[in-house]
Image (spheres, grey):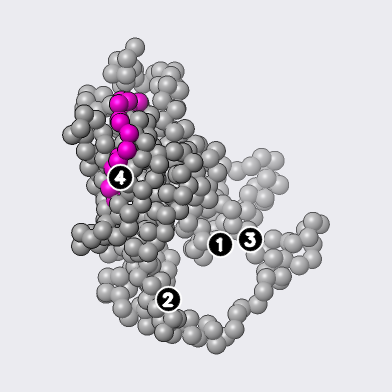
């Protein structure tokens, strides 16, 4: 797996458009379809919003190209403290990630959700 | 009543009032999910409608005995329906000829029926009259948003049709070049991929019909089609640059 692009953003709603545009660009240059790119944008913004709702202040978004094709995106909190628990709407967001991505993994080792990784396979 | 009790009671009674109560209780999920897909060229209201219909269908399919929460169950169901809606809309760009023809026949048959009976025909009546299945009528009418080439361009409904005012075919040399580039790109495909292109764009078969012919699932056809089109686009783009 090769790191392809890294983005660090404050967890603020007004930054989401910029993140979506960057994600779309990365997906396009990685050869993903239009629909795959749109799904990836949703997953990245939802992941950032989940971390924001937990109380984190900033996060990094790392895009990797997978050897077997497709991309892996890791969204990790890297500033602030995630003290809030997730709401019912956040649970829906998590279910949405599972519905859109080929694979989703959550890191909850530090007492709550702090990192989300989604994979879009070569078909995306 | 908690979630489990609600669904157990509905499963036992199939009471429509109870179903409506459940749908109202979870309608916010449809709203939340519809919002996530705004910005892809479809109005929120349309997405909300698709999501709500998926929710209603999902209520009937949900089995609380499996231990899953309803929100966990319904989210992929609604998401799937919304994605299908996007896929079907994008198919309009390449509306199969037989669907276009059927739409024209439906229009004419509807007008004749209305003139004779004084009311609009049902899909079943149209199907009987046109000698096609009810599903074909519904599918053709669903493929809306397409303007007939015969439609008049002036308010009075007379004079020139849209076909008359559309620009003529492009440069013939350009067409030949496009054809050459496409032929070269097609040669880069595998036998199965070429077969798929032939079925979908030559014979204008649906994904389901193509799946049957190729002996794979409709989902496989959908994925393969996306991949093949992407491959063709890239090959042709490269050829144009070179």
Is residue A37 rendered magenta in the image?
Answer: no
Above/below status of B93 relative to B19? below
Tell me the quadrant of the picture where the N terminus of chain B can be found.
Answer: top left
Q: CA distance from mark 4 to mark 3?
A: 48 Å
Nearer-the-camera pick, B171 or B126: B171
The reply to whether residue B92 is visible in this rendering is: yes
Chain bearing mark 3:
B
Q: Is residue A99 visible?
A: no
Say which label, 1 or 2, has the lower sequence index.
1
Q: Position of residue A52 (x, y in %)?
A: 37, 34
Instruction: Name the residue that disc number 3 marks.
Output: B148
Nearer to us in this view, A80 or B61 = A80
Q: Which residue is mark 2?
A: B237
Q: Could you say which quadrant of the image residue B114 lies in? A: top right
Q: Which residues are magenta?
A: A73-88
Q: CA distance from mark 3 to mark 2?
A: 32 Å
Closer-to-camera residue (B65/A10): A10
Q: Do the residues at pointers 4 and 3 share their chain?
A: no
The residue at 23%/60% (across/down) is: A2
Mark 3 Cα within 10 Å, few/some/many (few <14, many 20+)?
some
Asked if labels 1 and 2 share a chain, the reply is yes
Per the model, the C-alpha gap separating discs 1 and 2 is 33 Å
- The quadrant holding residue A99 is top left
Callout 1 environment at 10 Å: few (<14), some (14 to 19), or many (20+)? few
């Amino acid at each position: 797996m090769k790191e392809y692009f890294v983005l660090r953003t404050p967890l603020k709603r007004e930054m989401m458009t910029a993140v979506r545009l960057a994600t779309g660009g990365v997906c396009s240059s990685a050869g993903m379809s239009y629909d795959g790119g749109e799904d990836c944008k949703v997953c990245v913004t939802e992941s950032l919003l989940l971390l924001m709702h937990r109380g984190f202040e900033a996060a990094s978004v790392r895009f990797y190209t997978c050897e077997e094709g497709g991309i892996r995106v890791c969204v990790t909190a890297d500033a602030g403290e995630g003290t809030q628990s997730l709401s019912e709407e956040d649970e829906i967001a998590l279910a949405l990630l599972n519905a859109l991505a080929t694979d989703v993994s959550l890191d909850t080792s530090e007492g709550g959700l702090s990192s989300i990784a989604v994979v879009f396979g070569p078909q995306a | 009543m908690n979630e489990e009790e609600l669904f157990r009671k509905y499963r036992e009674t199939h009471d429509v009032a109870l179903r409506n109560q459940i749908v109202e209780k979870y309608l916010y999920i449809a709203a939340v999910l519809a919002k996530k897909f705004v910005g892809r060229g479809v109005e929120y209201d349309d997405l909300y409608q698709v999501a709500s219909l998926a929710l209603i269908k999902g209520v009937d399919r949900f089995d609380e005995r499996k231990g899953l929460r309803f929100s966990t169950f319904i989210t992929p169901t609604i998401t799937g329906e919304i994605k299908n809606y996007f896929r079907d809309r994008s198919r309009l760009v390449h509306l199969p000829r037989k669907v276009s023809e059927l739409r024209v026949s439906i229009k004419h048959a509807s007008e004749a029926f209305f003139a004779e009976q004084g009311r609009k025909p049902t899909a079943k009546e149209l199907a009987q009259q046109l000698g096609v299945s009810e599903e074909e009528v519904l599918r053709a009418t669903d493929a809306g948003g397409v303007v007939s080439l015969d439609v008049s361009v002036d308010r009075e409904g007379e004079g020139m049709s849209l076909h008359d005012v559309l620009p003529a075919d492009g440069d013939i040399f350009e067409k030949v070049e496009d054809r050459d580039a496409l032929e070269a790109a097609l040669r880069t495909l595998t036998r199965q991929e070429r077969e798929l292109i032939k079925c979908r764009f030559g014979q204008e078969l649906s994904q389901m019909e193509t799946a049957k012919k190729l002996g794979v699932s409709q989902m496989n056809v959908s994925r393969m089609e996306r991949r093949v089109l992407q491959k063709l686009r890239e090959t042709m783009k490269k050829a144009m640059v070179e």
